[in-house]
Amino acid sequence: MTEKQDNNNFEMLFKLHFKPLCFFSNKYINDLDSAKNIVHDVFTNLWENKNKIEINENLKSYLYTSVYNRSLNYIRDNKKFVDSDLISENFVEEKEFIFEENTNLLEIQERIFATLDKLSPKAREAFELSRYENLKYKEIAEKLDISIKTVESHISKALSELRKNLKEFMTIFIAIINLLRNF
């Protein structure tokens, strides 16, 4: 494979997985900028060591595991949480669920992002501000310079599309939403 092909493949890999990995890391560390740095570091490490790293599992699983581990390191190094025993239990349980027992979570996450990509830019932004940044409808309306009713409409549309595109995963989806709310 030529270096140009390597660069193109890596760029496609980066574009496909960067945003979902950032949200994945942010779920644990609750700091989107740091999550972006973590994901960037994972990709940088992968690129710099592409000839040394031996990936025995699929690449997507490798990326999520790397981001997960770096997120744990970030929490440890920054001591962001008071009840570390509870957090550790949740990480262990969730890691087993994600990486050992069920790869459906990654598929669900990909479907969520694919569904969000199909929304209008304003609807997607309203949904992400609500769900990922925990802004209230009024705050979103002010930030996007739209009415609260429009925010409600955008988020309702996003949720409707998610329900439609994830109906076979609804039980797992509800469990994930509850996990995210409690985390």
Image (cartoon, rainbow, N blue to C red):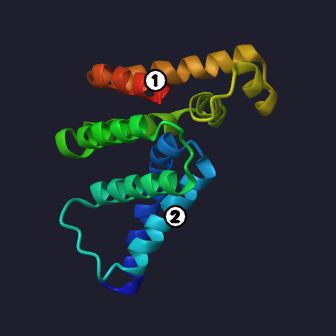
Query: Is residue 8 among the parts visible in the rendering?
Result: no
Residue 63's quadrant in the figure?
Answer: bottom left
Distance Cα–Cα, label 1 vs label 2: 30 Å
Classify residue 164 as left or right of residue 141.
left
Residue 104, by quadrant, is: top left
Residue underneath mark 2: 40
- Callout in the foreground (1, 2): 2
Identified by mark 2, the residue type is His
Q: Position of residue 119 (x, y in %)?
A: 55, 32
Residue topped by disc 1: 161
- Residue 69 seen in render: yes
Viewer-proximal residue, 87 or 144? 87
Residue at figure coordinates x 70%, y 20% from the top left = 137
Q: Residue at x 47, y 18 (%)?
A: 160
Residue found 49% across the figure and 21% down from its top: 159
Q: Quadrant of residue 73?
A: bottom left
Count of picture labels = 2
Q: Position of residue 26 (x, y in %)?
A: 52, 45
Q: Is residue 46 above or below residue 15?
A: below
In primary-sequence order, the first of circles 1 and 2 is 2
What residue is shown at x 75% (from left), y 16% (from top)?
Answer: 148
Report the amino acid beneath label 1.
Glu
